Image (cartoon, rainbow, N blue to C red):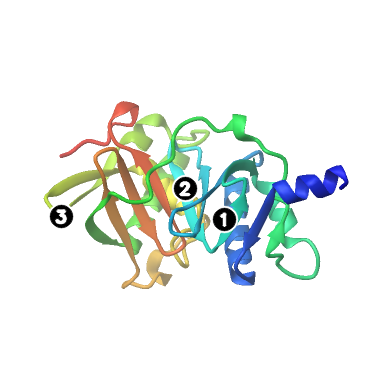
Amino acid sequence: MSDDRIRHAERLLTLAGPDDSVDLAAFLARAARLDEAAVVRLRRRGDGLLGIWTRTGFEVLAGRVVRGTVAPADTCVAAESLRAALLAGSGPRTEVDPGWAMDSAWRGALPPDDGYVHVDDVPARILVELAQRGVALTREHGAQGPPASLLAQEVLEVSGAGTTVGVPMRMVFALGAMGFVPGAGRDTVDSAGIDPTEVVRVRASATWMRLDARFGSVYLRRGGGLGLSVL
């Protein structure tokens, strides 16, 4: 067997259908837009689904789940090259070589798949409006990106299930930058076009907090330097 065929057999991404390929390609495009050298981590989950992760540049992780599998079961690859492989040819491909392993580029643990409590649901429109205000403030001060003080600021308090958490602006920015809210891309200037019934679910565990939107989730480790405090 040739070296290429051996490599293909050992490293393979298989998606359940074209819709999953399109969804994954959209996630990869957002990751590459934030960082042209973005690395994504692909990991098979215990429920038979495939988790995809990337760093957002806001000290927040972004994740999405699609139907599929990957070999090896946990691997890191370049976002842009994987996207190109998925979209090569006349239509979305559902079976590709994920590309060269870049496992050394990923440091740190991933959030668990479960173990969270549902704190409350927040109208997506509110989070988009907060992100827009943050962008406007950043531009007003002429900064090269949001200042650290703005990223760390808790802009929303959410309570439920006996828990109260503060949502920092870094999570709001990450949610918007990844385009996880329908109708709210990075360049959205009017939140009126967002369905008022569209919500973002806030969940928390002892060590992680997550915001779950329709097209993906963002995660932040509680405590430590990021200071996600109980109010």
Q: Which residue is mark 2?
A: 62
N-term-proximal mark, 1 vs 3 = 1
Across and down, in percent, residue 74 comes to: 56, 43
Q: What's the mark number on residue 212?
A: none
Q: Are marks 2 and 3 in contact (CB under 8 Å)?
A: no
Give above or below for 89 relative to 43: below
Say which residue appears at 47% left-offset and 67% top-offset: 183
> Which one is nearer the viewer's eye here, 68 or 158?
68
- At numbered mark 1, what does the secondary structure look like: helix, strand or loop? helix
Mark 1 Cα-neighbour bin, 10 Å: few <14, some 14–19, many ≥20: many
- Which of the 4 image quadrants contains residue 47? bottom left
Image position of 43 (left or right of 157): right
Mark 2 vs 1: CB contact within 8 A = yes
Provide the secondary structure element on which disc 2 rests: strand
Question: Residue 227 location in percent, x, y?
Answer: 28, 31
Count of numbered marks: 3
Question: Mark 3 is on which residue type?
Answer: Gly
SS category of the residue bearing label 3: strand
For residue 116, side relative to residue 98 (left or right): left
Badge number at residue 160: 3
Res. 121 image quadrant = bottom left
- Write the residue at 85% across / 42% down: 3
Bin the neighbour count of mark 3 within 10 Å (Cα to Cα): few under 14, some 14-19, many 20 and up.
Answer: some
Find out whether the residues at labels 1 and 3 contact each other: C-beta distance under 8 Å: no
Q: Residues within 10 Å of mark 2 (few under 14, many from 20)?
A: many
Query: What is the number of the mark on residue 27?
Result: 1
* Residue type of the residue flagged with mark 2: Ala
Residue at the left extreme? 162
Query: Which comes sooner in the sequence, label 2 or label 1?
Result: 1
Q: CA distance from mark 1 to mark 3?
A: 30 Å
| Kind of residue sitting beneath label 1 | Phe
Q: Of 123 and 221, which appears nearest the observer?
A: 221
